Amino acid sequence: MKLFLLCFLILIPAFLASEVWDSFKKTYNKSYATLGEENFRKQIFLERLKIIEEQNHKFERGLSSFSVTINQFADLTKEELFKTKPDGSQGGKVGSSARPSRPREDVPDSIDWRDYGVITPVVDQMFCESCWAFAVVGTVEAHVGIYRQEDVRLSQQNLVDCVDINFDCDQYLDIQMVDKTYQYITDNNGIDTVESYPYESYNVGPCRFSSETIGAKIAGYVNVTEGDEEELKTVVGTIGPVTVVITTDMMWGAYQNGVYYNEDCMNTTEIFNHVVVVVGYGNENGEDFWLVKNSWGTWFGQEGYIKMARNRDNNCGIASIARYPIM
Ligand SMILES: *[C@@H]1O[C@H](CO)[C@@H](O)[C@H](O)[C@H]1NC(C)=O
Ligand SMILES: *[C@@H]1O[C@H](CO)[C@@H](O)[C@H](O)[C@H]1NC(C)=O
Ligand SMILES: *[C@@H]1O[C@H](CO)[C@@H](O)[C@H](O)[C@H]1NC(C)=O
């Protein structure tokens, strides 16, 4: 399916476009309530195909470091996929409190924490803007693996329900959610296991935390110095994965392979719209990258992961709001 789309679509005649559309619907089990809805989705899909083709041609000619693909998000508008904030709202200056860890000589040139068996499987946040809960859970699970040698799965729903009673699944990302979440787990003296408190996808319920079913505790959390990719490398290389807040767009959502870099991707916190986990870094074909775990299931990117540009002026703000737990 993917190959067919990528190889043949650029000059696709109208009758074939319908075949590709049907094939897309079939692959991703898409169905639409009305014909109007379907036509609307098809239009988005066909426009996305064109953009994807253009990007992949740039990639093939060596003019870009990454390729993109059709995935299950190809019929969504940018607004549906990423809730970006209205201009100038919220935002806020992000402070920092650097805590240099170990001497930099110890920092490896590359690391992939998956090789240490401490990265839990990629999960799917589905249609709730709960990326922050998934990213913090993914980070804490990894640190529990590294420092306690335990394989735990923690409850995103515990966070969705309890961190901020005003949270709802449709809201714009509040960039303070990550700080609030780490603070919550610290003050609450733990977070429940996912078995005891499973994810409910779109529902925000009353807080049902139970101290009987705690999966992990943390002693606090640390802020990496804002925008300092070198310090982020030191932390990821010597301590463990880090939760980061970033800017994403449609091209990011369609990522397939290579090192994602977007010259339009800003590092100003006002437009941040997603939270993910940095689980490693390295260099691929001369491009430094951060290895990033997303929470859109394994259909996204490379089995759920994306490589994002490193040492390119903090592209997409990856080192702007970076936090990790103290175990
Ligand atoms: C579509 O549905 C089939 C059968 O229910 C399932 O096997 C397949 O994994 C689904 N595909 C996606 C993308 O959800
Ligand atoms: C991290 O930075 C945020 C934003 O400035 C601040 O509110 C928070 O208290 C800091 N957290 C720590 C642990 O330093
Ligand atoms: C933001 O990006 C600009 C240019 O892309 C860079 O000069 C600046 O240092 C970055 N700021 C931070 C805080 O990362």
Image: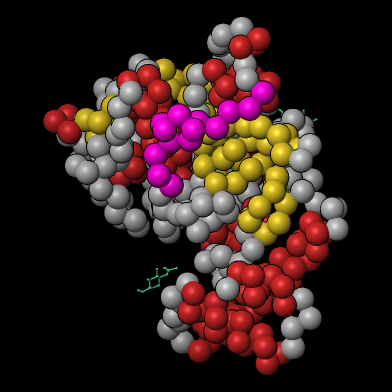
Question: In which of the image's four quarters is ligand 1 placed?
Answer: bottom left
Residue that protrudes farthest toward the left in the picture: 212
Q: Quadrant of the N terminus?
A: bottom right
The answer to whether residue 115 is magenta is yes
Looking at the picture, how far across and down is residue 89, in whole percent?
60, 44
The magenta stretch spans which residues?
Answer: 109-122
Q: Residue at x 33, y 23 (%)?
A: 149
Q: Residue at x 66, y 41 (%)?
A: 308
Q: How is the image coloured?
A: secondary structure
Q: Quadrant of the C terminus?
A: top left
Q: Specify the quadrant of the image occupied by residue 101.
A: top right
Drawn side of residue 238 relative to residue 5, left or right? left
Report the number of numbered marks.
Answer: 0
Q: Is residue 315 visible?
A: no
Is 33 above or below relative to 47?
below
Looking at the picture, how far across and down is residue 207, in whole percent?
23, 41
The answer to whether residue 299 is magenta is no
Is 233 above or below relative to 196?
above
Drawn side of residue 188 relative to residue 90, left or right? left
Is 34 above or below relative to 57?
below
Drawn side of residue 85 relative to residue 199, left or right? right
Q: Specify the quadrant of the image occupied by residue 42.
A: bottom right
Q: Residue at x 52, y 42 (%)?
A: 293
Looking at the picture, how far across and down is residue 155, in whole percent?
30, 40
User: Which of these two is toward me, 146 or 176?
Assistant: 146
User: Which of these two is toward me, 115 or 52?
Assistant: 115
Drawn side of residue 185 relative to residue 63, left or right? left
Residue that protrudes farthest toward the top in the picture: 103
